Structure formats: C-alpha cells, structure tokens
Amino acid sequence: MSTHLPEEPATPALVVDADVMERNIARMSAAALDGGFAVRPHAKTHKCPEIARRQLDAGAVGLSVATVGEAEVFARNGVTDLFIAYPLWVDDAKARRLRALADAVALRVGADSVEGVRRLGRALRGAAAPAQVMIEIDSGHHRTGVVPAAATEIGLAAVDAGLEVAGVFTFPGHGYGHDPRAREHAARDEERALGEAAEALRAVGLTVPVVSGGSTPTAGQWRSGAVNELRPGVYVFNDATQLAIGSCTADDLGLYALATVVSTPGPGRFVLDAGSKVLGSDASPWVRGHGYLPDHPDAVVASLSEHHATVVLPEGGPTPRLGSRVAVVPVHVCTPVNLADTLEVVRAGEVVDRWTVAARGANS
C-alpha cells in the first residue's frame, strides 16, 4: 500500500489503492488457473460493480453473494452468473424476487435442509429458467451446513421439489489463526468433507459438477482433487486480520480509511475522525486494537467511539501533528465497506475515480 496519502477527499473516507487491488485480483486468478480451479469471488466484501467487472475480466466464472439483495444489485449491473452462498429461508416476498432473478441470470442458491429446498422449489415454480441448488457442507467451522452423509437426503428432496442439484459448497472459517498449519488443516478438512459429500450424492444417482470451497486464509493451501471452484472474498483488499494471520503482507493491503488527526490530548496519544461508523466495530483475536496504521505499525487503535479513534503510540513514538492525515486499515474490511456510500480510488496517492458501493445495505 502506498504511504503517499491523497490530499483529497475530505475525511473520513474509504480509499481503494487500485494498483494493489488489481494486483491482488490478478494473483488470485493466476493461482487458481495454475491449480485448475474456477474462481467465483465473494462480492460481499466490496459490493461494487466496478470491482466485480475487474474480477470477471480476470477470469472469474461468476460471483458469490450473501443475499438476494446483493444478487439483484449485481444482476442490474450486468453480472449474469450468481451464487447466493447462503441457506435461504424463502418467504413470499423473497420467492417473487428469486423468480425474477432466475429469469434474468444463471442462478444458484445455497441450502442445508430438506425444508429449505422444499421452500425453494415452491418459490421457484413457474420461473422461466431453472435455478440450481448448492448443498452446504460443514467442513469444521460449525456454523451452517450439514455433515457430508446428510447431503443425500437434501439432494433427493431438491430433485423431488423440481430443482437441479449443481453441487456442494463449504466455508472453511476455522482456517483463521496465527499458525499457518491452521490454514492448511482447514483446506484439507474442506477437501475431505466436500469430497465425501460429492461421492454420497453420486452414489444415489446425482451428478455433482461443482465442488466449491476456498477462502482467503486458505489461499495457497489448496490442492487439486475434489474441489474445483474457489470463493475467496477479502483477498481483493485484505485487512488487518489477514495481515496478522499471515494471509497477506503489508504490500497487499488495498483499502484503508483516510482519517485526520483532530486531537493530541497527551504524549503518545492522538485522536482520529474515523470511529466505529467508518471502521466498523469488528474485533479480532489476532489484531491488537481496532485497526492497523501502515505509517505507524507499532501504534494501537486503543478505542473507538462513533466518530473518534484513539491511537496510542509506543513510548517515545512521535505524535502526528494536528490536521495531518493517517491511513487506518480496518480489522475486517467487509463491514466498513457496507457502511460507506462511495470508495475513493487512488493510484500513486492521487484520486482518480469514485465508485459507488451499490450493494450497500442490501442485507435481505
């Protein structure tokens, strides 16, 4: 990330270093191609059509999204292949929206229960084009998803509901941690769980063309075999957590909050105008404080208020002057993006564009 901070815009603002972001996209695409994987990036990280277009131009086969609302935004902006990687519980309103999406794009929807696929089948009945179901498998994160053996009951129920089973997917969220072995262990877990689920479905006569895994922390740990599609998201920008656990270097940080020093209340302490309404309030067991300051790497964002970030410097560290600008890399980048209306785009420290966070707040 360039330490040459722009003199515009007014602070606080979220800034994308376009050169770093494009390098991150190209590197992930090249690694997937070398490994024989398709890439379907998770767009909940950036929520931005301009970034989606760059990912697709770099070879992504489509996008993953978290909500029907996100899918609608990207469909309106020309994306034609979307996977809602979430076990939707469909009510009447979502049913109408899903049918409209299925008529407009190639649509896949996540599911992890018999009841869920039955509701999906009813919701999508009458759509001009069939939507496909991806069955979620728990590979060790223990959030959503089922054990591999349970995939067959859900798959057969999906077929009975008039749906096509496209494959299986998982999120190896237990790959987060300082120890690189955790990332490698999670990658092996997802390969094993997805492989077992795919074989179970094939044993009852279902084809399983897509076996989808992958995350930013497990990048670099993938092996060709059972998995043929990857869905990393945070890699496009990275953040303080990815830096702390070793998934990226400081040169790979592609987004920061630009803030101004508004107070220097005492030695070794200063206050920025970017609080929790800009940086988000996510905490991480691997990050000291509430963000990372590239120009002050030993500083700690000790506390956040809604509009204040209090930064503590190591003893003897020089305090930035009042009115100076400081970059803060968020702990978890997805939340600040969802709080912002726009992203300021810079190259070599100069603002060159402004992108709308078009899917901001599209949480349903």
Image (tube, helix red, strand yellow):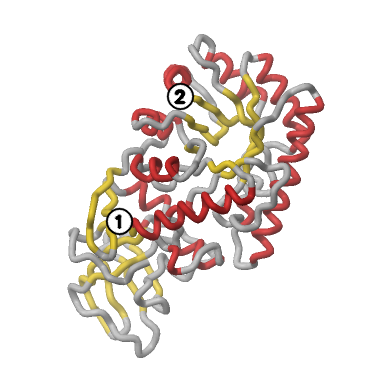
**Residue 166 at what x, y percent from top left?**
63, 27
Q: Residues within 10 Å of mark 2 (few under 14, many from 20)?
A: some
Outermost residue toward the right in this view: 203
Q: Left of 125 or right of it: where is 6? A: left
Give me the residue at 56% from left, 65% from top: 245
Q: Quadrant of the C terminus?
A: top left
What residue type is disc 1 on? Leu
Q: Quarter of the image containing the N terminus?
A: bottom left
Vertical relation: 161 (above or below) 234: above
- Which residue shows up at 69% across the image and 45% down it? 139
Q: Nearer the viewer, mark 2 or mark 1?
A: 2
Q: Amino acid at mark 2?
A: Val
Relative image position of residue 225 (x, y in whole percent): 73, 45
Q: Residue at x 41, y 36 (%)?
A: 363
Which of the numbered marks, if any, corresponds to residue 105? 2
* Numbered disc 2: secondary structure: loop
Query: Residue at left 39%, top 33%?
Result: 74
| Position in image of residue 339 (x %, y %) | 33, 48
Residue 14, numbered circle = 1
Whether 112 is drawn above or below 10: the answer is: above
Sequence order check: which comes first, mark 2 or mark 1? 1
In this view, the residue in front, 356 or 26, is 26
Q: Please, what secondary structure does the residue beneath circle 1 have? A: strand
